[in-house]
Amino acid sequence: MKKHLLTLLSLLALTASAQTDTLRTAASVPAVAVTPVGSPADTSAATPVVTPSSPAAVPAIRFGYLSYETALKAMPQYALLQQRLDELRKAYDQEAQRVEQEFNEKYEAFLEGQRDFPRTILLKRQTELEQLMQRNIAFKAQMRQELQDVENDGLMPLRARLNETLAVLAQRYGLALVINTDANACPFIDPVMGRDIQEEVLALLSR
């Protein structure tokens, strides 16, 4: 009887110890929420809510436009430059006509006397005509180059002033760029985005 009682007490002690260990293990495990069957699961933690991001505000581009050639030719200095070029062309044309007349006279004399000239004189006159022709060709090429150089040198400060004027207006009105409409480069310009600065440029250049 006493032996059976000791065995029963030992079993009770083991059972109590096992229950204590089970409770400790359960306390250390994080709780898991159980969703009842048939009810919608809460997925707010697993699936983030995506909201459309608002686009960044893009500033509207403003630009100016004008006919560059019209503005350039409206400058008083442009008229003075053209006057100087016309005077140079006139002087060059007169010299070219004189040289051409000289060549024609010598050529006619050569044709008239080529039958009677001795061979030495004939070759000399022929060489003179060829040299005169080459000098005329070189003179005309030099004339065209000098006229081009004078025009380029005269237009350089005019273009510089015009570009400075465009920069002043662009900064004044907050324009990103200025478009040259010459040669029908821009058949359509949105009046909301583009600003016609032709008259303002002409007014500034006339001062």
Image (cartoon, rainbow, N blue to C red):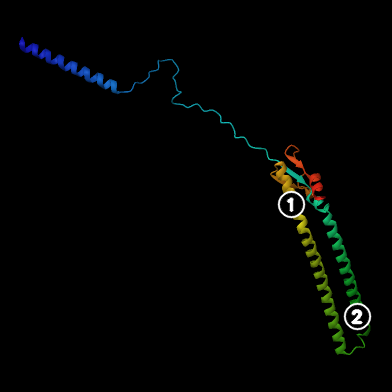
* Label disc, if present, on residue 111 of the rendered structure: none
Q: Residue furthest left?
A: 2
What amino acid is labelled 1 in the image? Asn
| Marks 1 & 2, CB-CB < 8 Å contact | no
Density class for disc 1 (Cα within 10 Å; few <14, some 14-19, many ≥20) is few
Q: Which residue lies furthest to the top in this view?
A: 1
Quadrant where the N terminus sits is top left
Identified at 8% across, 13% down, the residue is 6
Dot 2: what SS? helix
Dot 1: what SS? helix
Q: In this view, does 116 lie above or below 7?
A: below
What amino acid is labelled 2 in the image? Lys
Q: Quadrant of residue 126?
A: bottom right
Q: Quadrant of residue 94?
A: bottom right
Density class for disc 2 (Cα within 10 Å; few <14, some 14-19, many ≥20) is some
Which is closer to the viewer, label 1 or label 2?
1
Q: Residue furthest right?
A: 112
| Residue 95 in picture, x, y percent from top left | 88, 72
Identified at 85% across, 89% down, the residue is 120
- Is residue 161 visible in the rendered structure shown here? yes
How far, Cα to Cα, is label 1 from label 2? Answer: 53 Å
Q: Name the residue under label 2.
A: 106
Q: Name the residue under label 1.
A: 163
